[in-house]
Structures are given as C-alpha cells and as structure tokens.
Amino acid sequence: MWKWLGRLLLLAVLVVTAFVVNAVWFKPLSARVFYERVFLEFGFNSPELLSQLGLLESFGLRAHNAELDDRSQAAGDKQYAKMKQDLATLRSYDRDGMSDSEKLNYDMLEWFMAHQAEGEKWRYHEYPVNQLFGVQNVLPRFMTTTHRLKDKTDAEQYVSRLNQFDRVFSQVIEDLNIRAGKGIVPPRFVLEKVLAEVKGFTAGGAKQNMMYKHLVDAMAKMPELTDAERQKIAADAKTAMEKSVLPGYQKLTDFWADTVASATQDDGVWKLPDGDQYYAYILKQHTTTDMTPEQIHQMGLSEVARIQQEMLTILHAQGISGDNVAQMMTALGDDKRFQYPDSDEGRAQILADYKSLLEANEQLLAPAFNIRPKAALEVKRVPEFSEKTSPGAYYYAPAMDGSRPGLFYANLYDIRATPKFGMKTLAVHEGIPGHHFQIAIQQELKGLPTFRNILPFTVYAEGWALYTERLMAELGLYKDDPFGDLGRLQAELFRAIRLVVDTGIHHKRWSREQAIAYMSGNAGMAKSDVESEIERYIVMPGQACAYKVGMMKLLELRSKAQQELGDKFKLTDFHDVVLQNGSMPLAILERVVDQYIAAKKAA
C-alpha cells in the first residue's frame, strides 16, 4: 500500500512539475494559466506595483518592498519585447472555441496588449516629468502613502528605497535626454513649474523633508523598536536622504535648468514628430473609440450649449438674472454663503464635511446598487508640496489585501476653488458611488483572471464616475438643493468644456492662453483651477476626453436596456453588469450589456 502511495505521490509531483515548467517556460496549455503568468511577470517586474496592490504580504513575501522600479532604457526595451511576445502567444489560442466569459477575458487583454504594443512607436512622445506627475512627486507620494511602515523590516526597507532614488532619477534623466534629442521637450511653463516644485520639496535639508519625517513619525508608533534601533534607522535614513535623494533631485534640477532655454511656448502635441498621428493614437487609448478630434470637438460644443441652458433655467428660478453662465457662476462662487474661511480651520472643516457627505451618499444607494465595496474610504488633503499644480481632487485605490483604504484626496490650495455647492458632486465622483465603488469593487471581484482586477481603461473609470454624478441627481441627492444641482451641472459642463479645449490645444493648435480663455468664459471656475486644468490637458493629451465619452456611452446603454426590457429592467441589475465585469473598452462593454439584455429577454 505504502509503495503504491509513494508512486502516486511521485506521479503527482511529476505532473505538477510538468505543468509548472509548461506554464513558466512554454505556451501554457490553458489560456487562463497564461493570463496569470502574464500578470505575475508584469507584477514581479514592478516592485512598486506589488507594494501598491498588497497581494504578497499576507504570504510573508516582502522582499519587493525594499526595491524601486527599474526605469532604465534596457528595462523599457525588455518590456516592449515581452509585450509583443505575449500578444503573439495570446493570439495563438483558439478564441472561437471559447465560452462567452472566456472570450471576454481574451478580448479585454488582447485590446490592452495590442494598443500597448502599438505604442512602442510613440514611446518617447510623452512628458514623463511634468508639473502633475513624475518621479519628483510620484515617488514621495508612494513612499508616504503606499510603503508600509508597521515594523522594523518595513522601516529598513523604506531606507533601502531611499537609497535607490539617485539611481531612479539618473535613469529618468537618461530617458529625458533621449526625448530632447528627438525634439520632444515640454512647453517652457512645464519646466519652470517642475523646477519650482523641486526647489520647494528639497528646501530645508534632509531632516525637514516629508519622507524623513514620515519615517520617524511611523517608527514612534512601533513599540517593538528600541530607542537604539530607532536612532540607527533614522540616521541611516538621513544618510540616504543626503547621498541619494537630494542628489537625485539636484540632477533633475540641473537637467531642467539647462533645458529651459531650448523649450518653446507651443503647447499642443501637434508640434512633436508625427504629432497628429500621435494624438489620434492617444485619443483612442483614452476613449477606446475611433472618434476623430473634430467629432469630439463638436460633441463638446453641443454639450456645452445644452448644459449651460439647463443651468440658466435653475439660476433664473433662484432669482439670479443674466445670460452669461460663467459670470453668474463666478459670482455665486464669490458669495459668502458658499465659501469656507481661508484658514487651517476652514480647510479642516472641508475635509470633515466631505466625510459627512460620503456618509450621506450611502443612504441613497439602495434603489441602484446590490453590491458595495468592502474597502473603506478616507478623505485626505493633497500633499502641500504638490497641491499648487495638482488637480482639484483625485482618488487613490486601496490595497487589495485590505491593509490600506481607498483615499479621496482634496486639493485645498485655493479655498475659493472649493465652493460648498460643488462638494456633493465631487464626493460622488471621487468617492461614493464613483471611483471608490468602481475601482474597489473591481479589485474585489472573485473567480476572474487577476489582470481583470486591475486593468485600467480611462473611458470606463472616468465615464462611470461622471455617470454617477447624474445618477445621484436621479436618486434625489439634490432634491431640495438647487445650488447643489448647479454644482453638479457645472461639473458636467466642465467635462464638456474639456472636449473642446483638449482637441483645441492638440488638434486645432490653440495656445495655452486661448484654452484658458475658453474655459474661463464658459465654466465659472476659480482662475487657479482653470489654469491648472488647462496645463493638465497640455501634458496629458486625450485623457480629459474620456469622461464625457464614457458617461454618454453608459447613458446610451442604460437607455437601450430600459427600452428593450421594459418591466424586466432593473437599475440594480444594470449596475451589476457594469461593475461586476471590471474595466473594459466601450465596444466590449456594449457587447456585455447586449448579452445581459438578451438573457433577460429569454428569462
């Protein structure tokens, strides 16, 4: 008996070994195994992504938390080669023989990988260091938000990462040099703002830096550390700041200072080599459609006119006379009723009020949602060193193991940019049931290939968040609050204006000043917000077009389902279909909704 058990065990080991060898070194027999291999290989090439997801720590695997990503040219070459190799492997599977759910997996990954592989042609067309993002602010945010600091090992790994800043900055500067050699340099204002940001971040020396202080504060809450251990790790961190972090920032400062003289005032990507083709590519990346810049521009003009008319109706009903929406909304924003004190107390109250608004949103969701994310949501202030050039708000996804909640960051730099009548809508968009619902629920989906828990499509994510602004109005969020409804419409108007100015800058060759003038003349937003938004579109072409394109597609698909299903239509079911399949291109989303309609009809 034991002899046969031994032989069976040996056979099982051989079978498992053969399976593992096949999965790792050859084309996996199963597409599902291939999906997981692709995810694991991509993840293990990005220790920063692994730290953000928080998937390995529960298994006791923490070595990746001592490393920063490899941003070298060789690493980039390898990534593109691997992407093309994996795409070829994916296409070698028999899609026709797959079930509908398996085809969904295949088509999502194939769309993503094919577009990424096509992007090799445009590898150097982006601005990887700009006033919104880049190593100069992404890494400090990563260190203070994502890197775990719960015990001695975490603290030592934190120092290890600090020691790699100089290497990372050197790799990024090598990349910037290649771009400059190809004539790809950001507009001058971008370089000037990055230089000012870096100067502010490095002022005060090592011990005054937010990353050093963050570590020291975290170690004070680790009771298992002795005073001697705290002092040693703090000393090591100070040395890392002085020998790696600050020198890395100085290299970037020197490079940008030398580059400013060669930068132009031209703002659109039309100025880059084959810039029109690049803009078409990047529009498709963010909208997942083949809409032309002109089609998007005209959609924007039409939507601006429609939304402004709705706003005029409400403004007149509130006894506010006039016919210029921007001027009327600007005056409303200046009204003391809707302003917070420009003080620390006023800013603290804004964060507290956002928390209350998120709790209130929860009470209205029953008619529209069967599911809720398990991850909690917290509200935080945008880090002060980067708030001057950051957007008005943004969302940061939770860790997938539950160790970190979702984070809604509110920009409190210009207190006028946060009028009370706009806060309900912003809490919806960034939090509940906007980004937090969509992203946290996607991360928590079970039984799917792991890539579907994290795969991002801008048009889906931002389209959903903007769609929920309209949804919450339908659920009664603004029933007794006409000014709050104006805030909602102003937010939608803002997204319609984006269609106009993004295509204006990159397709019609508008200047930064022309785009600012158009937005200022139509939106009624704070001047600081208008300028930072236009500057955002200049360095992130196409991204701002995803919001309205995605929202309008979701409304179209919901209307289609309502018309075809009649009494069988349930809003909760529709949202289940949208949310429980994860992020996807719009054409695939439409196919999923069509399948849901067909199944409901047949039931």
Image: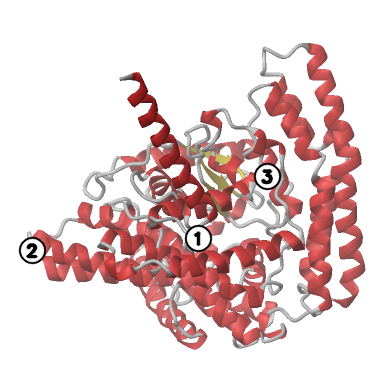
Task: Locate the C terminus and report the quarter of the image it occupies.
Answer: bottom left
Give the residue at x 38% y 58%: 469
Q: Is residue 169 above or below residue 440?
A: below
In the rendered structure, which amino acid carries the disc numbered 2?
A: Ala
Which of the numbered marks, if any, corresponds to residue 332?
1
**Separation of residues labelled 2 and 1 (CA atoms):** 52 Å
Labels 3, 2: front one: 2
In the rendered structure, which amino acid carries the disc numbered 1?
A: Leu
Give the residue at x 76% y 52%: 136
In the rendered structure, which amino acid carries the disc numbered 3?
A: Arg
Q: Are marks 3 and 1 in contact (CB under 8 Å)?
A: no
Give the residue at x 14% y 60%: 569
Give percent across and percent down for residue 140: 72, 44
Q: Disc 2 on helix, strand or loop? A: helix
In the image: residue 232, left or right of residue 549: right
Q: How is this picture coloured?
A: secondary structure
Q: Is residue 193 above or below residue 505?
A: above
* Nearer-N-terminus badge (3/2): 3
Q: Is residue 528 above or below residue 419?
A: below
Q: Which residue is mark 3?
A: 141
